[in-house]
Amino acid sequence: MRHLLSIEDLDRAAIERICDRAASFSEVAEREIKKVPALRGRTVLNLFYEASTRTRSSFELAAKRLSADVVNFAVSGSSVEKGESLKDTVLTLGAHRPDAIVIRTPWAGAAALVTHWTDAAIVNAGDGKHEHPTQALLDVHTLRRRLGGIDGADIWIVGDVLHSRVARSNILAFQTMGAKVTVCGPPTLIPRGIEALGCDVRYDLGELSQADVVYALRMQHERMDQAWVPSLREYAALFQVNGRRLHPRQVLMHPGPVNRGVELSGEVVDSPQALIAQQVEAGVVVRMAVLYEVLAGARAGGPTDDAGPPRDRASHPAGVA
Ligand code: ASP
């Protein structure tokens, strides 16, 4: 795998390979010294044009646990504030010769565009409302661990589907892994024609009890240019996942950040049914697996491998230390 731009680029075998590798990296987190030399001498550049808590910190930790050098570039305080374009920023930072660029922007398609301006492997950490492939991978990993597998699971994605890159990536990933996906929210927040992705659509929570997994989404105000629901109070009355609506056999997921009292009630966030902390934990090992895949996996044997770690070390990620 040269880049990770979209979940559409991955078939079931590739998703399973990444999740299996992530599982093998879990052991590193248990060690006293949480590091393996798999990407020693490689440079990972985190280029974030949008706010991030979980994604940026877990990519940084993932790269460091693989012994890569990490440069964190935040737009605030950079020359972007002086008007430097994405292209010029990438070309400038390219002079540092990064091996991988992890990029988050508010613009759909930006991660793919950047591949034309650098030789580095590009990992899409969220491009506008288009895709967030590593979120989908960590969610698949979390569910595989919790449910043993996803085949046949009934997964409901509830909330602001229209503005959510997570929804798009997760619908594709969950279905590729054999799940049945239903999206649910007010008609204004469900994209027209989304059934074309293969999912069902519901405009109320009446049949939520049929779900095995309830995946709640945040209201993405930063991508709204108008009021899409009459009020948050009314939205919460109709679509909030709370103790009354969540059945004890169901598991609850959310990509974060959670707006307590809006899409989720505090009681369900804090309940043992919530896998939110496990999702964050999975974020580190899954991103280790993705960085490993783009920097060591795909290139092993390729022309750029000369600059990489010894091939036998690179092919045994968990056993390298
Ligand atoms: N953290 C996720 C994202 O970056 C979800 C969210 O922001 O609501 O898309």
Image: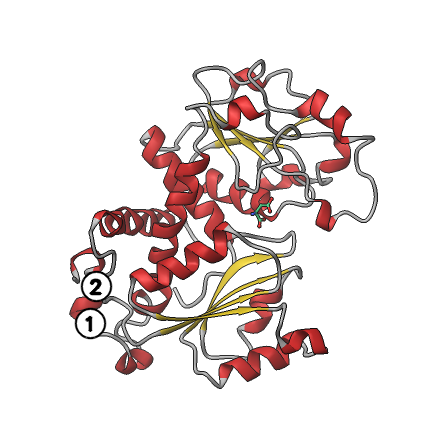
In the rendered structure, which amino acid carries the disc numbered 1?
Answer: Arg
Residue 311: image tag: 1
In the rendered structure, find residue 144 and report the number of the disc placed on it. none
Percent position (x, y) of residue 205? Answer: 64, 20
In the rendered view, does 146 fall on the left or right side of 210?
left
Vertical position of residue 251 compared to residue 127: above or below: above
C-alpha span from label 2 to label 1: 6 Å
Please tell me whether mark 1 sits on a helix, a strand or a loop. Answer: helix
Q: Measuring from the top left, give residue 248's x and y in whole percent.
A: 45, 15
- Residue behind label 1 places its C-beta within 8 angstroms of ligand 1: no
Outermost residue, bottom direction? 95
In the image, what residue occupies the spot 73% across and 40% down?
192
Is 18 drawn above or below residue 49 in the view shown? above
Question: Does the image show residue 177?
Answer: no
Query: What amino acid type should be assigned to the residue bearing mark 2?
Result: Ser
Residue at figure coordinates x 33%, y 74% from the top left:
42
Q: Secondary structure at mark 2?
A: loop
Decide if residue 85 is in sight here. Answer: yes
| Residue on which the image places disc 2 | 315
Disc 1 crowd rating (10 Å Cα; few below 14, some 14-19, many 20+) is some
Q: Residue 131 or 264: which is nearer the viewer?
A: 264
Question: Disc 2, disc 1: CB below 8 Å?
Answer: yes
User: Residue 317 at x, y = what percent?
Assistant: 22, 59
Q: Quadrant of the C terminus?
A: bottom left
Q: Residue at x 54, y 52 (%)?
A: 132
